[in-house]
Amino acid sequence: MTRGRFISLEGGEGVGKSTQAKALAAALRARGHAVVETREPGGSEGAEAIRRLLLEGSADRWTAGAEALLFAAARADHVAKTIRPALDAGSWVVTDRFLDSSLAYQGGAGGISIAQLRALHEVGSAGLLPDRTLLLALPAAEAARRAEARDRGGSDRIGGRDAAYHARVADGFATLAAAEPERFRVIDALGEADAVTARLIATLDDL
Ligand SMILES: Nc1ncnc2c1ncn2[C@@H]1O[C@H](COP(=O)(O)OP(=O)(O)OP(=O)(O)O)[C@@H](O)[C@H]1O
Ligand SMILES: Cc1cn([C@H]2C[C@H](O)[C@@H](COP(=O)(O)O)O2)c(=O)[nH]c1=O
């Protein structure tokens, strides 16, 4: 059995990852692939329970270190219970966020070192990386407009952090993409959703 392909969608709040994860999974299925569509934090029973701990409650519920550990623990369960079994069965896996979200949010924006976050990922998930990471790029004002129209002021613990935090997240993603051009593709997320999906699909030809 040929191992499946592992694709992650990344980017800040409101850039269209969830919309595009669904559309990309549908487009891959239409091409005859078995596809598992998943998300982080979450994607397995244990990780969905940790998601609630991470995204609900007061802003100061966790220290920065505890938050990083919880994301790594959720990812370890997600990888063991959902991602690796699907890849081993030959399915494509499309995930809405993965390790790079921890590197950009808890690392670039939150102050935990990238080396420590990668070490946690090594312990929890044996360092598994996507075959391709699609970073959706959108001007901050448009991303905020879309997120606001969707959430109507009711954002979660992390989405509700201030604009300076989210600007550091965006810078963190850009730095990660520049450092790993083989794995990352930066996709213009402006325009109609269908046009964005076509851009995403075009970056997967070699896989
Ligand atoms: N190409 C698009 N043009 C206009 N609106 C869009 C487009 N893609 C998605 N949206 C809308 O923007 C909002 C945010 O999209 P979505 O939830 O997919 O983003 P996200 O990156 O997953 O956000 P978050 O990380 O905050 O959950 C949704 O209301 C969605 O319907
Ligand atoms: C995986 C991951 C996520 N986050 C943050 C990013 C968002 O604010 C939330 C998830 O919400 P979404 O609507 O499902 O995108 O969690 C993070 O800070 N670190 C991570 O590793």
Image (cartoon, grey):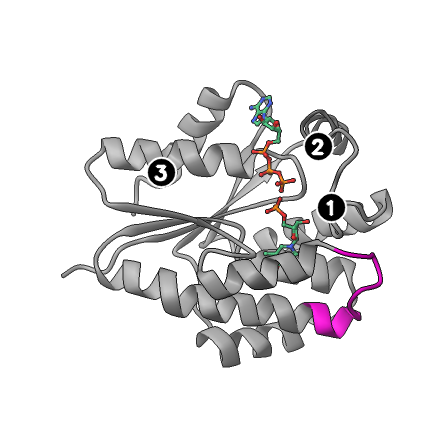
Q: Residues within 10 Å of mark 2 (few under 14, many from 20)?
A: few
The residue carrying mark 1 is 159
Please say whether residue 179 is visible from this viewpoint. Answer: no
- When asked about the image quadrant of residue 176, the answer is bottom right
On-image quarter of the N terminus: bottom left
The residue carrying mark 3 is 25
Residue occupying the far left of the picture: 1
| Labels 2, 3: front one | 2
Say what amino acid the circle numbered 2 marks: Asp
Label located before the other in sequence (1 or 2): 2
Q: Which residues are magenta?
A: 57-67
- Quadrant hosting ligand 1: top right
Q: Residue at x 43, y 28 (%)?
A: 197
Residue labelled 1 has its Cβ within 8 Å of some atom of ligand 2: yes
Question: What is the x, y in percent for residue 144?
Answer: 75, 32
Q: Secondary structure at mark 1?
A: loop
In front of the other: 177 or 154? 154
Q: Secondary structure at mark 2?
A: helix
Q: Residue at x 77, y 68 (%)?
A: 62
Q: Is residue 37 left or right of residue 76?
A: left
In this picture, is 97 found above or below 106? above
| Labels 1, 2: front one | 2
Say what amino acid the circle numbered 1 marks: Gly
Q: Residues within 10 Å of mark 3 (few under 14, many from 20)?
A: many
Residue labelled 2 has its Cβ within 8 Å of some atom of ligand 1: yes
Residue 60 located within the stretch drawn in magenta: yes
